[in-house]
Amino acid sequence: MKKNRITAAAAVLCLIAAGCGTSDGPTLPARVTTAAEESTGEDLEPETEAETAAVPETEEFSEADDGAADPAGTDTAAEAVQSLLSPDDVYIASAFSGTPDDPYGIVDVSSALYTYENCVNDLRELESYYSSILRTAVIGTTHDGRDLIAFRFGNPEAPKQIFICAATHAREYMTAQLVMKQLEYYCANYAHGSYSDGTSYRDLFDQVCFIVVPMVNPDGVSISQSGEDGLSREDLRQNLQAIYQSDLGFGYTTLDYDSYLRRFKANGMGVDLNRNYSPGWDTLNDRVNPSASLYPGSEAGSEPEAQALMGVINALPNPAAAVSYHSYGNLVYWQYGQEEPLWTANQVLAQHFCDLTGIAMGGESNEAGFSNWCVRVKQLPSVTVEVGSQECPLPIEEFSPIWEAHREVYAMLADCYQ
């Protein structure tokens, strides 16, 4: 079912050229450089329910034509999973291609400004050292032409897989930094490390491997970090200005343009990716045109980022659980309208996170999120984990306590589902 999505500011209507970049295949992008500066801003979220009410119909925003939504996921994602789990991989847990001079110095946590370019370059470097246990693949392409990258950590022929994703919302990019630091830690300690119960990491990750998308929304992250300069397509930059004027016009923001972009949550087309999935999508009316947050898209599964995640889950042979990292709040959402046995399975998964990290047990989450889709469509235990105690973007002072609390998450999950 497609809704009639509308604009709030006809005077600043910007036409979006049809077509987006496509991936050449499951290879990591070339090394890239970064240029952005850390900053914070006020909250974009409406203060009352009245401010999220549906608005009267006006002219339409123009949207890039990427074809019909694909709720089954993309061929690119399926091919990527096949590559990540290929039995042709040389899986030798004790054999690495050299050792970094500082095995804990690849993923930089001295600054909160963890960019898409940082993520790509760190994955390339980690894979160069730990190729026997780590492999990357491209699962899709964003509106602005960035490759969506997933990695597999552990035994590609493990009988179970656990899926993790982060940075679905633009301003929540510290979650990407977290899952990359987790990857670095487990690569460095794979051969000799062990979990608190004494089980070796090698044994755990031989039975359960991880498929991780560290930055679901690189276009949005780049907007939050670099403003308009974070987008390479001029038409998308112009549309970003139109989205801002729309949000101003309807009272969804009172921020200046730069602060507004720092607080951005959506993707490069103004779609909130955690409201772009089918369960409950047709009940959402907080936004009916592209916005910095809450707009669920022209139809469920309309966005390439959502299609890529669904494609990965659909292609996994035996997924055991899925985890979606967000910020902030230090709690875990686990209730998605599911019935038994998923009710208990999700509650147990959430409790494991609470026991390990000290975060609180949350209740129901919004409709049409990724975890909703995993639970209600795929019948897959899934939780949404919120980290941090301040409004986003989180300052670097938040990273250390988050890291200490979540360092053993991979081992905990593998221990639960082996």
Image (cartoon, helix red, strand yellow):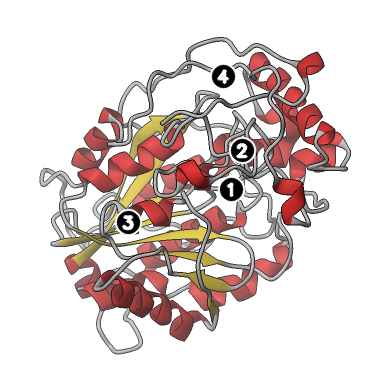
**Contact, mark 4 vs mark 2 (Cβ under 8 Å):** no
Quick one: label 3 or label 4, which is nearer the N terminus?
Answer: 4
Quick one: label 2 or label 1, which is nearer the N terminus?
Answer: 1
Query: Which quadrant would the N terminus be assigned to in this image?
Result: top left
Q: Indicate the secondary structure of the residue bearing disc 1.
A: loop
In three-dimensional space, the C-alpha distance between marks 4 and 2, rounded to whole angstroms, equals 16 Å
In three-dimensional space, the C-alpha distance between marks 2 and 3, rounded to whole angstroms, equals 27 Å
**Count of all numbered marks drawn on residues in the image:** 4
Q: Residue at x 18, y 53 (%)?
A: 156
Q: Position of residue 290 (x, y in %)?
A: 64, 31
What type is the residue that disc 1 sits on? Answer: His
What type is the residue that disc 2 sits on? Answer: Gly
In three-dimensional space, the C-alpha distance between marks 1 and 3, rounded to whole angstroms, equals 22 Å
Quick one: label 4 or label 1, which is nearer the N terminus?
Answer: 4
Query: Which quadrant would the C terminus be assigned to in this image?
Result: bottom left
Q: Which residue is mark 1?
A: 169
Q: Indicate the secondary structure of the residue bearing disc 3.
A: helix
Q: Indicate the secondary structure of the residue bearing disc 4.
A: loop
| Front disc: 1 or 3 | 3
Q: Which mark is residue 220?
A: 2
* Residue 327 as seen in the image, left or right of residue 239: left
Q: Residue at x 56, y 73 (%)?
A: 331
**Contact, mark 4 vs mark 1 (Cβ under 8 Å):** no
Q: Which mark is residue 63?
A: 4
Q: Position of residue 96 (x, y in %)?
A: 28, 56
Quick one: label 1 or label 3, which is nearer the N terminus?
Answer: 1
Q: Which one is nearer the viewer's eye here, 284 or 136?
A: 284
